Image (spheres, rainbow, N blue to C red):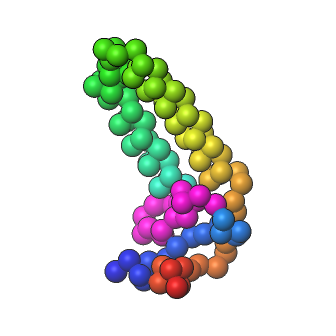
Amino acid sequence: MLKTKTLYLPTNATGTISTKVIATQYLKPWMVILYVKLIEVIMQTRPSALIRLFFHKEARLRSAMRWYTRIGRRVWMWELYQFFFVPKLAKEKMKMRDFWA
């Protein structure tokens, strides 16, 4: 049941959603964020996605997709920076039901 899962929060609890990690039995929080980011890279570098990004028929759409990719890259790096260097996870653990209460 999700309500009984442990939630790791930053000490200030004001970070983005990616800094709030549900405890897993076999993975550490840093492994979860790296796996999520790896999945994002795999999905963004699919051949169909790259072909669409570079060879779309309409120049305006290609430009918009390149812009979106640049923004996404900055967000991606910011999320990793925030996760690893800015928030320190609190020592006390919290249950999901307490978090949503």
Quadrant showing the N terminus:
bottom left
Q: Is residue 36 left or right of residue 81?
A: left
Q: Is residue 58 left or right of residue 100?
A: left
Is residue 19 located in the magenta-colored stretch of the structure?
yes
Instruction: Return the residue nearer the eye: 27 or 2.
Output: 2
**Number of disc labels:** 0
Residue 6 vertical placement versus 72 (above, below) = below
Q: Residue 12: x and y, percent?
A: 71, 68
Q: Is residue 27 left or right of residue 76?
A: left
User: What residue sits 60% from the left and 36% below the top?
Assistant: 74
Answer with the quarter of the image where residue 20 lies. bottom right
Instruction: Return the residue nearer the eye: 84 or 77.
Output: 77
Residue 33 vertical placement versus 62 (above, below) = below
User: What residue sits 69% from the left and 59% below the top?
Assistant: 87
Residue at the left extreme? 48
User: What residue sits 39% from the left and 43% below the top?
Assistant: 39
Is residue 3 located in the magenta-colored stretch of the structure?
no
Residue 75 vertical placement versus 31 (above, below) = above
The answer to whether residue 78 shows anywhere in this view is yes
Residue 50 vertical placement versus 91 (above, below) = above
Span of residues in magenta:
15-29
Instruction: Return the residue nearer the eye: 34 or 99.
Output: 99
Which is the main secondary structure of the residues drawn in magenta?
A: loop
The answer to whether residue 95 shows anywhere in this view is no
